[in-house]
């Protein structure tokens, strides 16, 4: 849900669920909703198109909502495979605000200090330009002045540009590397960053539990998610899960292959031995992921803050203090010779 999207569109499904539960006529409910929108927005045009399709009576509500883009493919699959439309829409609403991406958690502890490091080296490049001009002027007054200024040996363009390049590369690598692997190669992240597995698990196991509670079999649930899951990198995971279920093999082997934490795979292995229902297993797992995520993310952010802010402070203080000393030295020599 985007903060810039039409607020009427944001609350359409909530409104529909309320009306359907109260036994209201769907078409009349949507007409009443459309009358609240005073401007001819793109959303209102889509809504009026949906109302016209309902008047024709050729398609079910969920098909019309999908046709007019009020439901995406994944959400449409959830509704179609639920026991009824209301339960399906409730299932969609329960997942709508979930987000396993941790980029926002990285802004202050990682990207802000990396930005400070980048600007520090960029500032060093700019200062070196000024220093070169000052040296040209001072050498005219005294050819030996450079040795008295105490210019640090690392004050060279090579060091400045290497530092700038490395800091930009590290920042870009962390950002784009995380964005790519989080979406397309989550198994890579799970191997080195268990907190991401718990973050994804909070959402994934809730979806599984919700679909099972809505009356969809585990095998069918896995097949649906293998085609329509929002994270591309986990579609093959669900495809393998569906295959394992159809062949009556052990589920935990798939979770191990995708590097899920031991606490998750062990729980699945134990539940398979004790013949616990899939619904109970998924409920227990999303509760486990909730707990482990809350415990791990705070510790992880604290580690990031300590490491990246410490590096940023060291680089900024060292370069900044040397620049200040040189500014004072050059100013002093200019004053003396003038």
Image: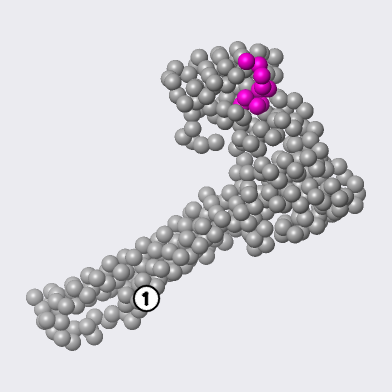
Q: Quadrant of residue 165?
A: bottom left
Residue farthest toward the right in the current orientation of the protein: 274
The percent position of residue 79, horizontal first and vertical second, equals 70, 30
Magenta span has 271? no
Q: Is residue 252 left or right of residue 52?
A: right
The percent position of residue 238, horizontal first and vertical second, equals 73, 48
Rendered residue at 64%/36% (across/down): 73
Q: Which residue is mark 1?
A: 159
Task: State the residue in front, 29 or 167.
Answer: 29
Label 1 environment density (alpha carbons within 10 Å; few <14, some 14–19, many ≥20):
some
Res 15 visible: yes
Magenta residues, start to end: 56-65
Magenta span has 58? yes
Q: Is residue 220 left or right of residue 55?
A: right
| Image position of 313 with respect to 196: above or below | below
Main secondary structure found in the magenta portion? helix
Res 206 visible: no
Rendered residue at 54%/21% (across/down): 49
Indicate the secondary structure of the residue bearing disc 1: helix
Task: State the residue in front, 284 or 213.
Answer: 213
Q: Quadrant of the C terminus?
A: bottom left
Q: Quadrant of the N terminus?
A: top right
| Image position of 221 with respect to 326: above or below | above
The percent position of residue 17, horizontal first and vertical second, equals 65, 23
| Image position of 201 with respect to 326: above or below | above
């Amino acid at each position: 849900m985007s903060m810039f999207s039409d607020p009427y569109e944001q609350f359409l499904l909530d409104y529909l669920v309320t009306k359907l539960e109260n036994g209201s006529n769907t078409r009349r409910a949507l007409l009443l909703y459309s009358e609240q929108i005073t401007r001819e927005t793109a959303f209102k045009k889509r809504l009026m198109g949906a109302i016209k399709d309902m008047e024709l009576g050729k398609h079910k509500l969920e098909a019309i909502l999908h046709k007019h883009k009020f439901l995406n493919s994944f959400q449409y699959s959830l509704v179609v495979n639920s026991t009824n439309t209301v339960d399906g829409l409730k299932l969609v609403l329960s997942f709508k605000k979930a987000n396993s991406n941790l980029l926002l958690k990285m802004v202050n502890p990682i990207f802000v200090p990396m930005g400070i490091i980048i600007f520090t080296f960029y500032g060093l490049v700019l200062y070196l330009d000024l220093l070169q001009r000052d040296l040209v002027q001072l050498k005219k007054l005294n050819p030996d002045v450079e040795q008295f200024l105490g210019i640090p040996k690392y004050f060279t363009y090579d060091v400045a540009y290497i530092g700038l390049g490395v800091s930009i590369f590290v920042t870009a690598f962390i950002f784009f590397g995380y964005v790519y692997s989080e979406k397309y190669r989550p198994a890579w992240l799970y191997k080195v960053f268990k907190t991401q597995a718990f973050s994804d698990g909070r959402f994934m196991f809730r979806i599984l539990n919700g679909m099972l509670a809505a009356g969809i079999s585990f095998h069918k649930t896995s097949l649906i998610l293998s085609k329509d899951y929002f994270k591309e990198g986990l579609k093959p995971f669900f495809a393998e899960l569906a295959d394992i279920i159809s062949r009556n093999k052990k589920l935990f082997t798939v979770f191990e292959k995708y590097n899920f934490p031991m606490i998750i795979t062990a729980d699945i292995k134990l539940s398979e031995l004790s013949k616990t229902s899939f619904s109970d297993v998924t409920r227990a797992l999303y509760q486990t992921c909730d707990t482990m995520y809350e415990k791990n993310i705070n510790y992880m952010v604290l580690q990031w803050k300590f490491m990246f802010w410490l590096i940023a402070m060291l680089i900024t203080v060292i370069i900044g203090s040397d620049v200040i000393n040189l500014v004072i030295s050059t100013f002093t020599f200019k004053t003396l010779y003038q």
